[in-house]
Image (cartoon, rainbow, N blue to C red):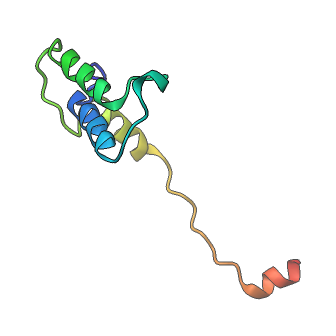
Amino acid sequence: MAEAGYDPVQMASFFDQLAARGSQPPQILSDHPNPVNREKAIMAEMKTLSPYTYGYESGQFHKVKAEIDLLPAPPPQTATAPAAQQSAA
């Protein structure tokens, strides 16, 4: 996640918020680590990463934004008159 330019703190925060929303099944019944364990694992792994300043413009933000700007505008929508709908039926 960090290599893609996204802030891993936000992933840990997500799992913290998930745990705060209610009880979780026991770890043994889960096919994934429960959110508390995930948060601890994320925090431990973050200590091994190089320092980096994360922001909304990290990752490929500018590239994707430029590609979106090149897309053509959607065609205008026309309202269908009720009489036309009835005659088509």
Residue 9, quarter of picture: top left
What residue sits 79% from the left and 88% below the top? 83
Image position of 14 (left or right of 84): left
What residue sits 57% from the left and 67% below the top? 76
Q: Quadrant of the N terminus?
A: top left
What residue sits 17% from the left and 14% below the top? 49
Residue 43, quarter of picture: top left
Residue 41 lies, in percent from the top left, at 26, 19
Residue 10 lies, in percent from the top left, at 24, 35
Image position of 76 (left or right of 27): right
Residue 22 lies, in percent from the top left, at 35, 46
Indicate whether 89 appears above or below 20.
Answer: below
Residue 45 lies, in percent from the top left, at 22, 15
Residue 8, quarter of picture: top left
What residue sits 34% from the left and 33% below the top? 63
Nearer to me, 62 or 11: 11
Q: Farthest bottom residue? A: 83
Q: Quadrant of the C terminus?
A: bottom right
- Number of marks in the image? 0
Nearer to me, 44 or 75: 44
Q: Farthest top residue? A: 48
